[in-house]
Each structure stands twice: as C-alpha cells, then as structure tokens.
Amino acid sequence: MKMNTKASTLLPTLVLLFIFFHLSFVSCRKILSNREGNDFTLDLIHRDSPHSPFYIPSNTQSNCLRNAFHRSFSRASYFKKKSFATKNTIQSDISPITGEYLMKISIGTPPVEILAIAEMGSDLTWTQCEPCINCFQQSTPLFDSTKSSTYKPVGCDAEECLLISTCVVGNICEYQMFYGDQSHTIGDLAFEKFTFPSTSGNNVDIPNVVFGCGHDNGGTFNNYTSGIIGLGGGAVSIINQLDNEINGKFSYCLIPIALESSISNVTSHINFGSNAIVFGPNVVSTPLIKKDSYTFYYLNLEAFSVGNMMVEFKSSKTGSSYASADGQGNIIIDSGTTLTLLPNDFYTNLVSTLVNMINATKKDDPSGTFGLCYESEGGTIDAPKIVAHFTDADLELSPSSMFAQVEGGLVCLTIVPAEDIAIFGNLAQANFLIGYDLVANKVSFLPTDCTKY
C-alpha cells in the first residue's frame, strides 16, 4: 500500500526521530514512573465470548474459528509494515486493528468506562472524545474531557509530546495516526487518571497516564469499541507508563477459543505487577529479543519437533522480520493473531513431517485457506506430539490447538505459511500462563488450565 500523503512529506525527518525515539525511551520511562506500585488482574474478553458485544449466539464453534482465521491474515499484514513516526505523525501503512481481545477500563474523574481493543501490536492508548469533528459510531457515550477534573493536555515542551507528536495552536500537543486503508485517528495528547477494574473487586487508580483523546476518527472501525489500549513494548505503551507500578511485568492466560464461545461463566485474564510473575517447577523461560521496533515482542524459535522428528527453523528469505543480523528474534509472539505463521520453507518441511506421521484421510479445504486438512467425524485426529523449541524453552502444544475443526467433518492445521513474517499466535498460546518481564527481558510459560486460572 502507498503511504498516506500526509505522512510521506515528513519522511526526511524519519531517521532523526528514530534516533531520538531510542534515546528517549529510558528517560520517558523515568518521567512516567513516579507513582506508587499496584498489582491487579483484569478480564481479557475474547470477541466471541458471551461477555463481548461481538457475541452472536447462533455462531457455531466452526464459524467462530473460521472468522478468526481469516482475521489472522489481515493481522499479518499489520506486522509486515513498520510504523513510521515523525514529529507530526504516527504513520501505520497497514489495515486497522479488528481486535481479538477487549478490555474494560475507566478514564477521568468521575470515571467513564470504555471498552477498547487490547493491542500488543500498538503503543498509544486512545479513545474517541468530545467534541467530535468526525467519529465512528459507538454504543457508549464519547469521553468528554471538559467534565473530568483530572484531564490535563500535554504541552509542547513535554517530553511525551516530543516523542510521538507535535504542537498546534494553543500549546496543545496533537497526535495523528493514519492507516493504509485511510482509517485514522487524530486528536490531543493528554494526561488523565485511569481506573483499572481489578477482578479482586478493588479498583486501581493510576494518575497522569498519557493517552490520545481522539476528535477525528474514521474508516473501518466498528461501533462496539471506542479505541485501543496499547500493550506494546514502546515508550508510551501502558506497560512502560506503569513501569513503577508493575516493574515491567504483565502476563495473561488465554482460554482456548473453542471454549471462549461456549462457556459463559469464565474469561481469559491479564495480570500486571507481582500478580504477573510466573513461577513453579514447570516454568520455562526464553529471552525477549529487542529489535528496531520496540513495539513488537520477538522470540527466537529454533525448531518444531513432531513425534521424534526435529524440524529446524529455516527460511530462504533474508532481512524482513525473521531475524536480526545476529540471527536472533525470528518470530513475534502476539495475542491478537489467531493462527501461527511460519516462513514458507519451514512450513513446507513441517507439513511434510506431519503427513508422514498422521494416519488419517487428507481432504482439501473448500475455502483454500488451509494447506493441511483431514476428515474427522468427531472434530479431532490422532496427531503426534508437537513441541515448539524456543531458546531455552520447549513448549508442548495442545493437539486441539494445532488441529482445529473449521467446519463439520474437517480439521485443519492451524499453522500457515507466510512470506515476510513469523507469528506465534493465540491458538498455540492457549492454556499457558505467559509472563512478560521487560526488565529481565524474558518471556515465561507455565502449562495452565486457563478456565480455572
């Protein structure tokens, strides 16, 4: 896709700002981390859960999975393009984020509840605000900053403004974000009190969180959510803004998608602070690799094993997002992508190994989405043990997450080939308690029944 013209004129400043962004990363964490610590756990609502406004009771498990799989391919294009940031624009040459998981938080004093997309691939948290020049419809009232006693616009001389935005008339810091399909959000950068509704029953109030108050938002956003909660690794993400409270730690436990749509009294959860520490005799940890984009969370995948056969990570592509010059950081871990995407060469070898070990009748996927499918009356097949081998961490993956029923009598491998991206998706992550430690630079995994967590 071609870059939005509003941002393309600013490309000459890209390199300078890129350097500035990296230099400012540590100092921004210090500026924003001046509050007392809190630990809390929130509901992480899958879009197909009965707790979600997207929920359609008549949808079958197969329908939900098929729709989620299609969203994965759109999602992959998100990661293929790097976000360009200049003093005037956060430029994202991508499709807008549809969202797999949602979070409820409240903003302002008195608090106004919003339902937003929990987004590990974005940093800036933003919501639609009054007065609205151009907004997409949403089912809840827009946030009105004039009614909040704790709303404070970010000034031109604030370091937060210099990091991601620019100044306009009246010493107000404005942000702009454009997407490849012409969707956008434009508004004011501000400080505000955020209230997190902990599952313990106690609300956690955090003052002076930087967020975007969007006054001009449009495109293909839906009317069920009001914005995005940025959970990426960049300087202005919620994770780094709450550094003093959570010490760079968060974790989540994802219920298998097939159960999300059928069980009404449970939901996935996301933890912050000491609540997020993953420990126990069965915990394995792998390094969190830092690359040019601080937003994305990179791991190093060494191989998959199928039964007693090892299939090593392989790609004929150089550059792209697979690995840095030292060969590390070849896959993104992302809760917002359902499928797992692997390089074509690696995928081909993996599929060949699986075919040799599975005694079942192969069947083509009528939609052409999946490359390896089998007939199955009961929705399962007798698949060999599949283990993902990350550096220092071996994860035995659930057969039901690797082969899912996409329609009646048809189960398919939930790993697909990709040109320029590798993503470890949320199906593979289900029923693991997964902890991120941005201070120790590691990700930890503990096999867990997330319906009971």
Image (tube, rainbow, N blue to C red):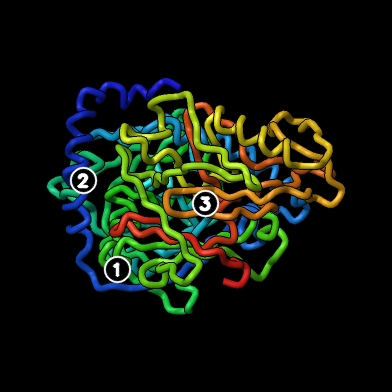
Which of disc 3 and disc 1 is earlier in sequence?
3
Furthest toward the bottom, the residue is 201
Q: Quadrant of the C terminus?
A: bottom right
Residue marked by disc 1: 245
Q: Is residue 334 left or right of residue 13?
A: right
- In this orientation, does residue 219 appear? no
Q: Is residue 377 left or right of residue 417?
A: right
Percent coordinates x, y for residue 22 in the rendering: 21, 42
Question: Which of the two discs, 1 and 2, sits closer to the camera?
Answer: 1
Furthest toward the left, the residue is 157
Percent coordinates x, y for residue 124 in the rendering: 35, 48
Q: Tell me the amino acid under the disc marked 3.
A: Thr
Residue marked by disc 2: 161
Percent coordinates x, y for residue 76 in the rendering: 51, 35
Residue marked by disc 3: 225
Residue at 53% x, 50% y is 138
Q: Tell me the amino acid under the disc marked 1.
A: Glu
Which of disc 2 and disc 1 is earlier in sequence?
2
Q: Residues within 10 Å of mark 1 (few under 14, many from 20)?
A: many
Of 309 and 51, which appears nearest the observer?
309
Using the image, determine if residue 103 lies above or below residue 230.
Answer: below
State the CA–CA distance, disc 1 to disc 3. Answer: 27 Å
